[in-house]
Amino acid sequence: MEPILLRARGTKNSRSIAAYRSAGGYRAIAKALKMRDVIDKLWAQGAVPSPTPPAALEAQIRRETELNGKLLRAAGVGTN
């Protein structure tokens, strides 16, 4: 069974956007990423906690997708 990270009260489906928002969404995750035990567990797994507002994360993903696409095209890498 997979661990449940967020669950809205009274719901069984913790994977829905509604459950995410009901559970506090970004604010809940940002709060958890400031907790010492959470930070330690993430570091132990090789992850670096860096709470990023949703809009900033979306912009970062767009930039990286564009850059990686250019690099792959320049290298002649294509899809099957």
Image (cartoon, rainbow, N blue to C red):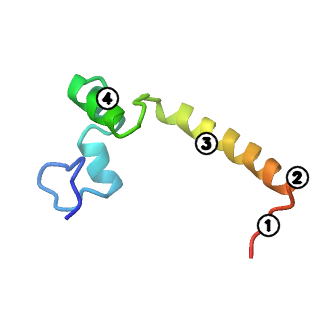
Q: Which residue is mark 2?
A: 74
In the rendered structure, which disc, 3 or 1, sits on the residue that comes first in sequence?
3
Mark 4 or mark 2, which is nearer the start of the sequence?
4
Q: Residue at x 21, y 28 (%)?
A: 37
Compared to 65, does 34 lie above or below? above
At label 2, the amino acid type is Ala
Cα separation, mark 2 vs mark 3, equals 20 Å
Q: Amino acid at mark 1?
A: Gly
Image x and y of residue 2, in percent = 23, 60
Question: Is residue 40 found left or right of 1 in the rendered image?
Answer: right
Relative depth, front residue between 13 and 73:
73
Q: Which mark is nearer the camera, 3 or 1?
A: 1
Q: Nearer the viewer, residue 75 or 9?
A: 75
What is the C-alpha distance between the residues marked 2 and 4? 38 Å
Q: Which residue is labeled 4 in the image?
A: 33
Tag 4 secondary structure: loop
Q: Which mark is residue 78?
A: 1
Residue at image point 57% right, 40% down: 58
Left or right: 72, with 38 as reference point: right
